[in-house]
Amino acid sequence: MNEVLHAATQFPSIVFTLLLGLLALYWLLVIIRLAPIELFERDSLKEDHLASTLVSLGFAGVPATLALTVILSIAGALTLTIELLVLRWLPLGLLRIPVGVLVLWGTLVVASPIAAMICQAMHSGLHRYRPFTRRCLLGKSVVVIERQDAGEVAFAKIDKEPSSSVKLLSKRDGLPELGERRVLVKYLPDEGAYRSVSEQVYLETRVRLNKLRLKQKSGHSADYSTSH
């Protein structure tokens, strides 16, 4: 036990130890209702923020804080295992810092898809509770099952969750069709409803935005190179 505690306070394990400690404090505040579940969520996926980034990584349907907790728990466990089995036996000296950074990066890369699968498996259970069916649903795919008022008001079920139901409000130039697959992109708190776009449009927009970000990064890198 002492060896595990000692390993948890060594770099790089201590990074996850501190972060998980903060998350544990946060969840305690959530339990006593002093902190919101949707801490990082916004009403729309349009802007770049932590929640929208996690949605693009496959964490749609769960709060960003829950996704982070699962990711960091898995990455922390992997890092602690590497520390106990490998790092503590090596005379690294100052090399521990670059090696530790590499371990941090590698464990996060490995943990992310595993955490995404775990979070996806939790969807149906979480969505039975109201706090998990608001902004947390942004990025989720739904299937239109009912239309009202010429289609401006519609109801849909979350993909692979037949007992679920969400309300869609649409503008006249983007009315949903029965059976159409759409993606929730904006939450309307006053109406308790969502704006949505067709799944194909959503995917095409994501690809276009990713290409734009890559061009912007390339442009910044080129400007930096020419200025030095």
Image: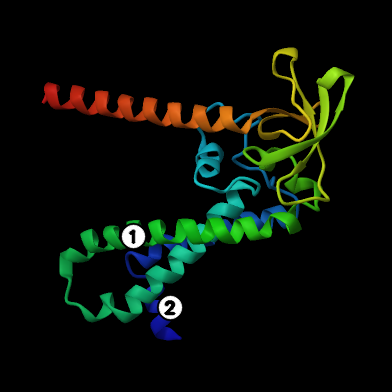
Question: Residue type at mark 2?
Answer: Leu
Of residues 121 and 65, the one nearer the viewer is 121
Q: Regarding mark 2 in the picture, which secondary structure is present there?
A: helix
Label 2 belongs to which residue? 5
* Cα–Cα gap, marks 2 and 1: 22 Å
Q: Which residue is mark 1?
A: 106
Q: Is residue 190 left or right of residue 72?
A: right
Q: Position of residue 162 (x, y in %)?
A: 80, 50
Camera-side residue: 156 or 75? 156
Q: Residue at x 44, y 26 (%)?
A: 208
Where in the figure is residue 70, as x and y percent of width and height? 55, 60
- 191 or 76: nearer the eye? 191
Residue 4's x, y, as percent? Answer: 42, 80
User: Can residue 191 be spotted in the picture?
Assistant: no
Q: Residue at x 58, y 31 (%)?
A: 200
Vertical arrangement, residue 163 with respect to residue 195, above or below = below
Residue 199, by quadrant, is top right
Badge 1 element: helix
How crowded is the residue under tag 2: few (<14 C-alpha within 10 Å), some, or many (20+)? few
Q: Nearer the viewer, mark 2 or mark 1?
A: 1
Residue depicted at 41% across the width and 61% down the height: 110
Q: Is residue 130 left or right of residue 45?
A: right
102 to the left or right of 26: left
Q: Position of residue 46 (x, y in %)?
A: 56, 26
Q: Residues within 10 Å of mark 1 (few under 14, many from 20)?
A: some
